[in-house]
Amino acid sequence: MNVLVRIQFSSPGEDELASMRSLARSLTNSPASVRVFADEPGWLVAEFTMPTEPQYAALPKIEREIRLCVWDRRDVRIGFPMSEAERARADRKAEQRRLRRRRAT
């Protein structure tokens, strides 16, 4: 499961980058998947993968690690973007539903 954590800081620096890396490494199932970068001014983004589980079960784990690893945060946004394979599967299923509805009418 892909995870995207965006955290706003008053003035992000090396310490904040290190804490974001620590956050991602503590949650990932693949250390090679961890990517931390600056997005907008004041925002840092950690992108990584986690073992597949329901998002409602993963969210408390992510929130707990944020409280432990990232001290001077201002705002937090957590997302679960779909991979290309997941997106393609969802598109195929949506198209199948559309075709079934058209045939039914």
Image: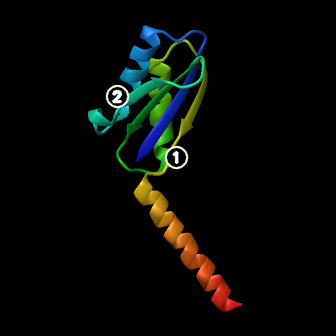
Say which quarter of the image contains residue 21.
top left
Say which quarter of the image contains residue 19.
top left
Please rate how many residues cluster around mark 2, counting C-alpha atoms within 10 Å: few if below 14, some from 14 to 19, many from 20: some
Q: Amino acid at mark 1?
A: Tyr
> In the image, is residue 40 above or below residue 82?
above
- Residues at circles 2 and 1 in contact by the CB criterion of under 8 Å: no
> In the image, is residue 25 above or below residue 87?
above
**Quick check: 34 left or right of 10?**
left
Say which quarter of the image contains residue 3.
top left
Please rate how many residues cluster around mark 1, counting C-alpha atoms within 10 Å: few if below 14, some from 14 to 19, many from 20: few
Q: Amino acid at mark 2?
A: Ser
> For the residue labelled by badge 2, is the local secondary structure a helix, a strand or a loop?
helix
> For the residue labelled by badge 1, is the local secondary structure a helix, a strand or a loop?
helix
What colour scheme was applied to this rendering of the protein? rainbow
Closer-to-camera residue (77/26): 77
- Which labelled disc corresponds to residue 25? none
In the picture of the structure, the residue carrying the numbered disc 1 is 56
Q: Residue at x 53, y 66 (%)?
A: 91
Q: Residue at x 30, y 39 (%)?
A: 29
Q: Nearer the viewer, mark 2 or mark 1?
A: 2
Closer-to-camera residue (65/102): 102
Q: Position of residue 17 (x, y in %)?
A: 43, 16
Q: Residue at x 45, y 24 (%)?
A: 37
- Which labelled disc corresponds to residue 26? 2
Q: Position of residue 2 (x, y in %)?
A: 42, 44
> In the image, is residue 47 above or below residue 89?
above
Q: Position of residue 84 (x, y in %)?
A: 43, 55
Mark sitting earlier along the chain (2/1): 2
Placement of the C terminus among the 4 image quadrants? bottom right
User: In 3D space, how far apart are the residues under numbered discs 2 and 1 (Cα atoms)?
Assistant: 18 Å
Tally of numbered tags: 2
